[in-house]
Amino acid sequence: MAHYEQTLTGEVDPFVEHLDQAILSGSVTANQEDAADHRIGDARMVVRVYERYSAMGGNRVSLSVAVLCVGAEMSVSAITSGGSQAIFFKINTMGEESFLQKAVDAIQGYGA
């Protein structure tokens, strides 16, 4: 599992649209598996789950991105899973790290 966190300032809808475009266009096999959008008072949580085939690992890798937004403040967590072929411990996590890097590049490139 690979993990990245970042805080940002901005509007959540354009940010999530940016993520969708950047992550889905980064691989011909990438797709959005599911999504959720919740509001409680002034807080909003948007979740996206993406998946793609990892040729390096010969398997599928998932990427979950959660965005917590209150006003213009956003806290983003991106976590990958899958991609290992071992039974008792993780080996060959290159597919996870590569997929996470797509999210990191999109997050860091937002508004740049």
Image: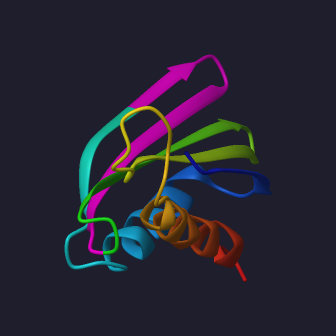
Residue 68, picture quadrant: top right
Magenta span includes 95: no
Residue 98 location (% of width, % of height)? 50, 71
Question: Foreground residue, 112 or 59?
Answer: 59
Left or right of 27 on screen, residue 73: right
Q: At x 67% / y 38%, what residue is drawn?
A: 69
Report the quarter where the N terminus lies.
Answer: top right
Q: At x 40% / y 45%, what residue is drawn?
A: 48
Q: Residue furthest bottom?
A: 112
Q: At x 36% / y 45%, what residue is drawn?
A: 49
Q: At x 58% / y 30%, what residue is drawn?
A: 44
Q: Main secondary structure of the magenta part?
A: strand
The vertical placement of 7 against 99, above or below, is above
Left or right of 102 on screen, residue 57: left
Residue 31, picture quadrant: bottom left
Magenta span includes 43: yes
Q: How is the image coloured?
A: rainbow
Residue 14 location (% of width, % of height)? 52, 63
Residue 56 location (% of width, % of height)? 34, 74
The residue range painted magenta reads 37-55
Report the quarter where the C terminus lies.
Answer: bottom right
Left or right of 53 on screen, residue 75: right
Question: Foreground residue, 17 or 55?
Answer: 55
Residue 87 location (% of width, % of height)? 36, 35
